[in-house]
Amino acid sequence: MERARDLAALVTTPLLPEHYLDRLDPLGSTLALRGRISAVLPETRDSATVVIRPGRGWAGHVPGQFVRVAVDVDGVRHWRAYSLTWSPDRADGAIAITVTVVPGGTVSEHLVRRARVGDLVHLEQAAGDFVLPRPAPAKTLFVTAGSGITPVMGILRDRLDELSDVVVVHSARTPSDVVFGGELRMLDGLRRIRLVERHTSTQGRVDADELESLVPDLDERETWACGPAGLLDSLEALFTERGLEARLHVERFQPAVRATGTGGTITFTRTGTTTVSDGSRSLLDAGEEAGVLMPSGCRMGICFGCVVPLREGSVRDLRDGTLTSALPGDGVLVQTCVTAAAGACDLDL
């Protein structure tokens, strides 16, 4: 067998046999992890669950984790991160992500409106630590808003039998905008969970003070929260004030900004683009405004899709003010969604 492969490699040089097998069987490829869409299931008017059969290299996931998915749109490959919403133990091996359209979102619009059964997508392995421990806590609270319900639904579908006392506080604009609304309400009706459903168009947002009245035993609950920055910031302040920081686990759509840099000229060396940015704007936003194709998974939930090499110059972390500098040849990796220019800087993009 080894000799046959060596002969095949000689015949197909400069390509390897794997390159040809990759064309014939994309899901069996050892060169790249891919998946094939097997269903697109509408959830609301602006969201859908995309069912994917992953290739043989898929290592599985833990409920609550996310996966980075890439689609090719108009000849450009775009990566985004989405929470996994199905149990990992399905007999058919399929996984699912539930996507809500983001205004102007290239990938979310494509997956919800235009993706078709049979389409191939590119995948990375599952990642993230927004997961339940084992054994599960005696009392749990999930606080979510909008598409922040997606990792929580993945957890509930897999671990609910292990949970004896579950409260879900979820906010969406209207009843019809509640992703998984029917399933959540059914679980509430069966008393598997206690659902507190808030419709912000008529009832406003849940704030920290109201959460205490909605969940009187808040101090006794291990809490997982996912949603917009304002919601998570208020929860972090509340739990810190009560000395309960260790009981709160958050998953952010976007990083919390707590400091600003000094601003400067940003040069994107591969594209030859230059722009000037102030210290309050992230490198990610500045690059996109300048027309640079920036890698990112930040807006749909999860981190590290936006990391690029800083070839030269200085940037400041918007969360804590930490300064990072690079000399020519260093290639220091920086997370563009949480850093701003702190003087002139060159990015390898």
Image (cartoon, rainbow, N blue to C red):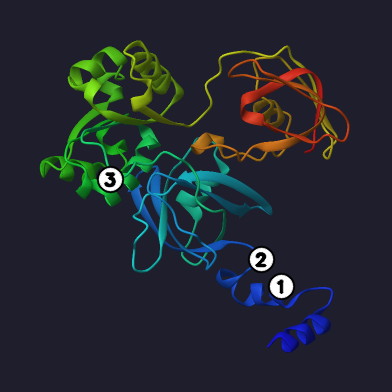
**331 to the left or right of 222:** right
Residue at 52% from the left image edge and 28% from the top image edge: 254
Q: Residue at x 26, y 27 (%)?
A: 199
* The quadrant where residue 217 appears: top left
Is residue 289 rendered to the left or right of residue 88?
Answer: right
Q: Position of residue 213 (x, y in %)?
A: 19, 16
Mark pair 1, 2: CA separation: 8 Å
Picture quarter with the C terminus: top right
Q: Which residue is mark 1?
A: 19
Which residue in the protein does label 2 denote? 31
Mark 1 or 2 closer to N-term? 1
The tag earlier along the polypeptide, 3 or 2, is 2
Question: Of all residues shown, which one is farthest toward the right?
Answer: 328
Kind of residue at badge 2? Leu
Q: In terms of sequence position, does the residue under pointer 1 or pointer 3 come before the other?
A: 1
Q: Distance between the Cα atoms at labels 3 and 2?
A: 34 Å
Q: Amino acid at mark 3?
A: Leu
Crowd around label 1: few <14 · some 14–19 · many ≥20 (10 Å): some
1 and 2 marks in contact (CB < 8 Å)? yes
The residue labelled by disc 3 is 156
Q: Are marks 1 and 3 in contact (CB under 8 Å)?
A: no
Decide: is 107 above or below 312: below
Q: Categorize mark 2 by other alpha carbons within 10 Å: few (<14), some (14-19), many (20+).
A: few
Residue 235 seen: yes
Q: Position of residue 132 (x, y in %)?
A: 34, 41
Tag 3's secondary structure?
helix
Q: Are marks 3 and 2 in contact (CB under 8 Å)?
A: no
- Name the residue located 33 percent from the left edge and 26 percent from the top edge: 247
For mark 2, give the secondary structure: loop
